[in-house]
Image (spheres, coloured by chain):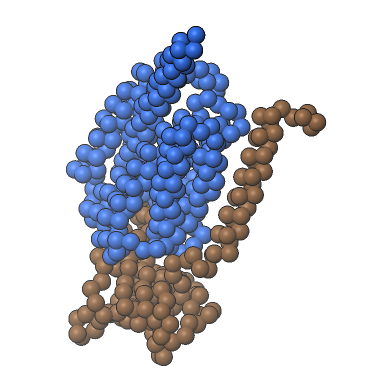
Chain colours: A brown, B blue
Amino acid sequence: MSTGLKPKHQRLVLVIVALVVLLGAGALAAYALRNQASYFYVPADIAANPPEVGQDIRLGGMVEMGSINTADDGVTVHFVVGDGAARVPVTYAGIVPDLFVEGSGVVAEGAMNAEGTFVASNLLAKHDENYMPRELEGMTMEEARETVAETYE
Amino acid sequence: MHGFANPARFLRIAKWLTPLCLLAGLVIFGAVIVYGLFYAPPERLQGETARILFIHVPTVWFGMAGWTTIALASLAELVWRHPLAALAARAAAVPGAVFTTLGLLTGSIWGRPAWGTWWVWDGRLTSFLVLLFLYLGYIALAGALDREGSNSRVAAIFGLVGAVNIPIIHYSVIWWNSLHQPPSISTSGSAMAPEYLWGMLGGALGISLLFGGVVLARMRMLLANVQAEARLRRKAMGAAEGLAS
């Protein structure tokens, strides 16, 4: 060993260098995939980069408060998906999942029509990271979050 | 660390530690399941389906902890040539794969009522499925090497390379839009009511003890195999020498 390193230290350096290279490659791949690996577009993406009419995409965001409107036929729902930056009106005909409520997350599969409305063929509810018992149900999301934070501290 | 390098010393400690871990793990995890099924309150939006959390999150964590064990043991094998490291990595693979499978199954069962689908190809679910495939590949590779009596360290290299997937699983819900929700607990606090948080952490404690117990039991078994083989080889050598003289 002309370097004066013990074999075990040589191996350690080799493994660390290999791991750094590997993690770098992984990070680069993840960075390159940042658009493709996303499961859905948010309304801001749609506003910035409007998809073609009829092109199949997924739209995800929050169902705006007070926006759910059931049509007279009883199965068609109209609602607005927003992300704080942009809003997209959505229409869907079919049975909605249990967690589909105003103020909660949703992922809709479908396409934009010529009028700028997103016509969904499938709805998936997106649960958020909050877990709260029913006693907190009457509170708003903010109050409940504070209650949870206080009890946890 | 090298205090445990002596297999005889390891066996002495593992002999009483194995049943202790398994028993404590069964009792604690059993208590968490009873709590989760009968005492935890229904969740505000999800209702009764939230109860699967107490099994899903701990099994998923230890699906990932299993590979972290493989990676650390592989590092110890490659760099320090620790005599028990290869056994520890091989011993962690099967329980890790079992927990990963349980995590995928419980998540799928929860996803049907909560999301409206059994499975989607989002970043979290896909990277976690890749973890299961990595386990299956590792088990097959390590098994093939051991059957051939090879001293090759290819399995350790595979264990280290596969560890790249662990941070990808963790950050998949942060880097990319995904259907799976972001983590409920982080260094800045918890978005979970204490009823759920403590049950989940109790479940994780139980699963960690079960995982530790199974790894120790499997290490003892693998060590016994090695010793039995060495004894057979010595006997065969002795017989061959006896014939030659």
Q: Residue B243 location in percent, x, y? A: 45, 12
Q: Residue A11 location in percent, x, y? A: 66, 34
Q: Splitting the image into 4 quarters, where does residue B220 fall? A: top left
Q: Splitting the image into 4 quarters, where does residue B207 fall? A: top left
Residue at the (25%, 60%) spot, across then down: B113
Q: Residue A120 location in percent, x, y? A: 34, 78
**B74 shown above or below B54:** above
**A10 shown above or below A103:** above
Q: In the image, is B119 to the left or to the right of B189?
A: left
Q: Is residue A76 visible?
A: yes
The residue furthest front is B244
Residue at the (79%, 32%) spot, across then down: A3
Residue B91 or residue B144, whichever sits in front:
B144
Look at the image and tell me in which quarter the N terminus of chain B lies: top right
Q: Is residue B223 visible?
A: no
Residue at the (21%, 39%) spot, across then down: B34
Residue A82 or residue B13, whichever sits in front:
B13
Residue at the (40%, 63%) spot, across then down: B121
